[in-house]
Image (cartoon, rainbow, N blue to C red):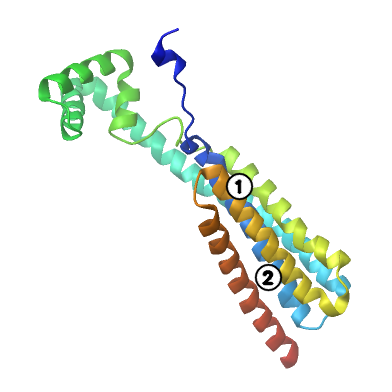
Amino acid sequence: MTRLAAHREFHNISRIGWLRAAILGANDGIVSTASLIVGVAAANVAQSSILVSGVAGLVAGAMSMAAGEYVSVTSQSDTEKADLARERKELETAPLDELNELINIYVERGLTPSLATQVAHQLMEKDAIGAHARDELGISEVTTARPVQAAWTSALSFSLGAIFPIIVVLIAPAPFLVWGVAAGSLAFLAVLGAIGARAGGANIWVATIRVAFWGAAAMAITAGIGALFGKVV
């Protein structure tokens, strides 16, 4: 076995497709459901109504996340497919121009013109559309759009995140429900931030503080609106 073959690397960028959707879904599940619960609870309604609101928020949010992710990522996928179709047509009608495009790209990256020409020739002989997708369009196997994966990942992670505030509603005494949901959700958000940072190779403390801060801000604003609405009604 050669030294090159024995050296294997794993980069966190390979997780970006599902990690972004998972973290977004779980974070939104905790924040939106907890904010909804806190806002309704601050309006002084029955605990059963608060629970129904939380469950309704979970179902509606999960469906919304799935639909939204699918539609948005499908738009990205359609754009990628359109660009690749255009590249295939240009490779058929103007192969020399496409070759020169690759050569110029490699020269700008630091290769000498002669080496850039050699590299461009070899890559186009092996996989012309792959070379242009990667080096001209920035489309790779790792970052390519996957609508179905993004949709179910977001829906599942949203549901998992939303379950935690609902569990707190079931176990917290009515007088402490608002504070219990708020404190529990902040703890869940902190754990989520740490997990996401760990999976993505980022700074754990920075991610944890960022997620917890914005979650606290969302719940505080919603609680204020709920309390005001409760007084008016």
| Left or right: 130 in relation to 114 | right
Q: Do the residues bearing badges 2 and 1 touch, measured as CB atoms within 8 Å?
A: no
Q: Nearest the camera: 8 or 125? A: 8
Question: Which residue is found at the position 50% from the left and 52% from the top?
Answer: 203
Mark 2 or mark 1: name the one nearer the start of the chain: 1
Residue at the disc numbered 1: 22
Rendered location of residue 98, percent (x, y): 20, 26
Question: Which residue is found at the position 69% from the left and 62% from the top?
Answer: 187
Rendered location of residue 61, percent (x, y): 67, 58
Image quarter (top left, top right, bottom left or bottom right) of the N terminus = top left
Residue at the disc numbered 2: 35
Mark 1 falls on what kind of element?
helix
Question: Which residue is found at the position 78% from the left and 68% from the top?
Answer: 53
Q: Quadrant of residue 199?
A: top right
Q: Is residue 39 above or below residue 12?
A: below
Q: Name the kind of residue labelled 2 in the image.
A: Ser
Q: Nearest the camera: 146 or 188? A: 188
Question: Which residue is found at the position 76% from the left and 58% from the top?
Answer: 164
Q: Residues within 10 Å of mark 1 (few under 14, many from 20)?
A: many
